[in-house]
Image: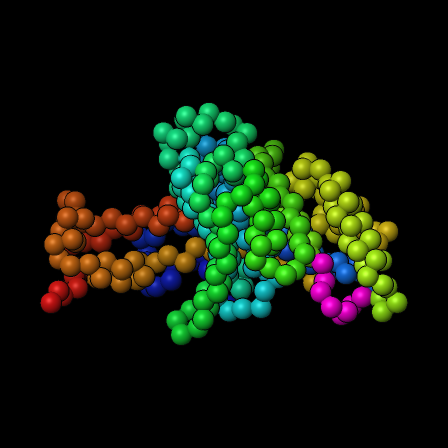
Amino acid sequence: MTDPTLPHAPHDHDRPPVPNVTVPQGVQPFHLRDKPVRGRLIRLGELAEALLSRHNNPDVVKKLTAQALALTAGLATALKFNGSFSLQGKGDGAVPMLLADCTDSGTLRGYARVDEDKLTLLNGADAEAGALLGSGYLAFTVDQGPGMDRYQGIVALEGETLAEMTGHYFETSEQLASRVWLAAGHTPAGWRGTALILERVAGEGGIDPLMNDAEQDDAWETALILASTLKEEEMLDDSLAPEQLLYRLFHAEGLVLGRPRPLSYGCRCSRARLSSVLEGFGDEDLDEMTQSGEISMTCEFCNTTFRFARDEVKGASRH
């Protein structure tokens, strides 16, 4: 299997090294026996530090990005697809663009675009997503590649936190009752990010056939109450294993752990891919991009800069 953090083509030798980081128990699925509740606990571990350290963003922006990465990993691993699942927040605030994506194999990447002037005016070290993103939209996209249908759900940015915004999306766009808890912060071990996602199971699969609607409602509400007792420091504590954390919450409710799924650092940029992008420009545009005989392109995700000699890039013919 090819390491997704390595260069994608033989002539990528000048690509600076990127982290080879995998968290074996990045996503821990679970359900509550005979109850209409299933969920996933996402712990990015050292992967959060590896991803966030690629950009010199203020802590408040790193916190938002870590939340987005954990949330995206949690939502992606609930789906059966081949390709990538992405979360995109676009607004008119200090962070006009927030993007995270996760492939079906669990490779994760993300970045936040920052408006320094607006961030200075905001002057909020503890600002949440609502203040940082401003007015705009949140989009969830499943992209399975060329020739396949692309699914996208879009909702207006409503709520103070990213968890509240996601809840608004579930309420307006999905039939499945869901709740999200997010935590991110800088710990003694570095940046960490965690998500807990609960979903109410639709239909009768896996539910006690003797449980009536009122009892199912009660089981769901009980799970929400228990999850709400979770503290941020618990969510970000590396010494507290995922199964231990979930046991603390749901051991009296028939906790059943599923098979954990790994998450890894995965930026898909390459010289070959960026070269094909450049070849879509005309020669005049390429000349304008050239400085000292070279064209530089920087990947927004991993912040790696690729340099191309101008005479090596053939521009697209214009008719």
Indicate left or right for 148 with 306 as reference.
Answer: right
Of residues 183 and 128, which is closer to you in this image? 128
Indicate left or right for 182 with 218 as reference.
Answer: left
Image quadrant assignment for residue 194: top right
Please report the residue visible at 44 percent of the width from the left and 73 percent of the height from the top. Answer: 148
Q: Is residue 204 magenta?
A: yes
Query: Extreme bottom residue here?
Result: 147
Please report the residue visible at 60 percent of the width from the left and 59 percent of the height from the top. Answer: 174
Query: Extreme right residue here?
Result: 210
**Residue 278: % across, % down:** 23, 58
From the viewer's perspective, is residue 114 above or below residue 37?
A: above
Please report the residue visible at 39 percent of the width from the left and 71 percent of the height from the top. Answer: 146
Of residues 189 and 276, which is closer to you in this image? 276
Please report the residue visible at 25 percent of the width from the left and 48 percent of the height from the top. Answer: 296
From the viewer's perspective, is residue 119 above or below residue 283?
A: above
Indicate left or right for 76 with 92 as reference.
Answer: right
**Most prominent secondary structure in the magenta stretch?**
loop
Magenta part of the protein: which range?
A: 200-207
**Residue 19: % across, % down:** 47, 49
Q: Is residue 283 magenta?
A: no
Image quadrant assignment for residue 95: top left
